Amino acid sequence: MDANNALRPSKIIDEEVKWDKSKTIISKTDPVGTILYMNDTFEEASEYNKIELIGEPHNVIRHPDMPKVVFKVLWDNLKQGNNFHAIVKNLTRTGRYYWVITDFDVEKDDKGKVTGYTGRRKALPQSVIQKIEPLYKTLLEIEKIKGEKASELYFNSYLQEEVNSSYEDFVVKLFEDSGAAGSNGAIEDTPKEGGKIKKGINWFFFGETNPK
């Protein structure tokens, strides 16, 4: 489903939007990505209000700097009923951007059919962005010049040859190697124990009182 161009900004601004990074962005969609619910933090970060986005495709906030292959991997996993962590650069109403790490609850009916998704997104430290951004730029350039299939082939080979892991494992490792959840719930560039976040990515999204 294509984004509604009328809602997208006419100009891209290379500037990060200001939002409360200690909070969690939450949205709920149907199986094809139509937005059914968004919280106030989503409004703040995206600069869209609920009236504008309810009923619209979630890709209305897709930033043109994001390679399509990342969303292909994400949606392939979600459609199979798998949670998936991804690092995403989103587009705001005014053409600015914000970076997040994602987590999903996949909702199913009694027969196991996927009925929708609840997505949670939280801010990342600059150190993670600096590591993932060059890869995304390379993938995007390949897509522009050689097409999406070539980008996918390079992406798969990169994961195999350079990081020896799946994309999700790569994302989680970047997260774990770069910081820990601070007392206010935001991720920070802080010392870590043994190269790992002590409480892990599930604690980062859900906290000790609501383990996943």
Image (cartoon, grey):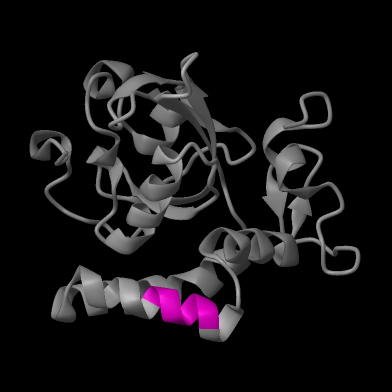
Using the image, determine if residue 212 lies above or below residue 163.
above
**Quadrant containing the N terminus in the rendered view:** top left
Asked whether 143 falls inside the magenta stretch, the response is no
Name the foreground residue: 20 vs 105. 105
Residue at 55% across, 66% down: 166
> Residue 206: where, in percent of width, then height?
71, 31
Q: Looking at this rendering, what residue extends furthest in the left direction?
A: 6
Residue at 65% across, 58% down: 172
Name the foreground residue: 23 vs 149. 149
> Residue 76: where, in percent of width, then height?
38, 49
Using the image, determine if residue 108 lies above or below residue 94.
above
Q: Looking at this rendering, what residue extends furthest in the right direction?
A: 193
**Quadrant containing the C terminus in the rendered view:** top right
User: In this image, 56 relative to 197: left or right?
Assistant: left
> Residue 52: where, in percent of width, then height?
23, 22
User: In this image, 91 relative to 56: left or right?
Assistant: right
Using the image, determine if residue 129 lies above or below residue 17.
below
Residue 45 visible in rendering: yes
Which picture quadrant has residue 177? Answer: bottom right
Q: Looking at this rendering, what residue extends furthest in the bottom direction?
A: 161
User: In this image, 132 relative to 21: left or right?
Assistant: left
Residue 93 visible in rendering: no
Residue at 71% across, 65% down: 178
The rendered magenta stretch, by its main secondary structure, is classed as helix
Q: Which residues are magenta?
A: 155-160
